[in-house]
Image (cartoon, rainbow, N blue to C red):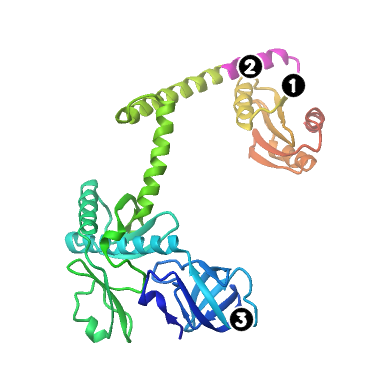
Amino acid sequence: MTRKLYYEDPYKMEFESKVIKIDQDERGFYGVPEETAFYPTGGGQPHDKGTMNGIEVIDVEEVEGEVRHYTREKLPAETENVLGSIDQERRIDHMQQHCGQHIISAIFDDQFGIPTTSFHLGKDTVTIDLDTDCLSGDLLEKVERRVNEVIRNNYPVETKWLSVEEAAEYPLRKPLAVDGDVRVVIIPDIDYNGCGGTHPHFTGEVTAVKFLGWTRNKKQVRLEFVCGYRVLDKLEQKHRVLTEMKRLVPRPEEKLVEEVDELITSSKEKDKKIAELEEQLLQYEARDIISESQEDRVIQRVFKDRPIKTLQSLGKAIIEEASDAYLILISEQENQLQFVLAHGADIDQNMNGVAKQILPLIEGKGGGKPNFVQGGGKKIIEGDAFAERVKNLL
């Protein structure tokens, strides 16, 4: 068994140790030191990163009693001792997030009867699943305020290895799922929990907690939050966004939401008006095309870079007026052709059959209703030549 220095001193960022094993498995190269300060993935907390003898440690997992340190490249076979160095910023961050989660879960459970069912420490934020179907803004405000009070009061954070019988004497938040000794994390009068993660010695080191929002997850609620230095990171991100917003919308901060809401409403109204005008223009264009094609039973046009939705709208407008005509509309683009094939109400022919015959010309796909199909493929053939092939079939 590897001696786990991170339990003895979570602030220990460097260590020396003999190497028990150097090997490789499906995850990659790994080394097993006799003792380690690297925390392995477990209990919702990610592994530490760092180096051993200057070689990057990219993953740490506990497998069959071994704490395997997966390295970017293989440790030399003759390695007898290693100097390990932990990524201090990552370790402190994980300690802040994990301890913050303990306090949050304790307040939700003890004061509001909402237990935590799972915990995930992510790269940017932390989430817990709470056994409830809704969280009100008032409740979140109360919990967040109380959690930050606990942090400011700087309670000690103690850890003890206890037998199951000894641990049962404490008001544990969850029943223990082990038979042997268990590590209990204690924040006096706040939290008593079996936990194998790394934690600071005092709640004040968590610095602060900020709730970011919640979503429904199955029949529970998933709460997202940040602790410690991540709060400052989020504040900096939001400050940059707000500063840029004020440059684009020169209004006081308290008026920005109102102003942006007005801009969005105005933009939606303009978009609606533009769509109406575009529809009118398509109607005029459809009439012009019909007028120019009075003697033609097959109306065909080839356009450059027109979206397929525009072809569809134009096609529908044309066949509504030209009930006895076939229609071929093609859009040539840099590397592809798109088309609409249709006919008016006085014609009885399934255009899917026509499309099926011409799609191989462009290695394409398409289909639709018997009187109106659309499709597209590669620009293997010019649009005019493609249109003529379709016309010949009609």
Is the residue 287 above or below the residue 112 in the image?
A: above
Quadrant where the C terminus sits is top right
Identity of the residue drawn at 52% across and 75% down: 83
- Residue 297 in the magenta stretch? The answer is yes
Label disc, if present, on residue 208 of the rendered structure: none
Nearer the camera: disc 1 or disc 3? 3
* Residue 69: % across, % down: 53, 74
Give the residue number, with chain letter if any, for mark 3: 79
* CA gap, disc 1 and disc 3: 85 Å
Q: Which residue type carries mark 1? A: Arg
Residue contact between numbered discs 3 and 2, judged by CB atoms under 8 Å = no
- Image marks 1 and 3: residues in contact by CB distance under 8 Å: no
Q: Amino acid at mark 2?
A: Glu
Residue holding disc 1: 297
Q: Secondary structure at mark 3?
A: loop
Q: Which residue is mark 2?
A: 285
Q: Residue at x 24, y 54 (%)?
A: 148
- Which quadrant of the view contains residue 193? bottom left
Give the percent coordinates (x, y) of residue 365: 70, 43
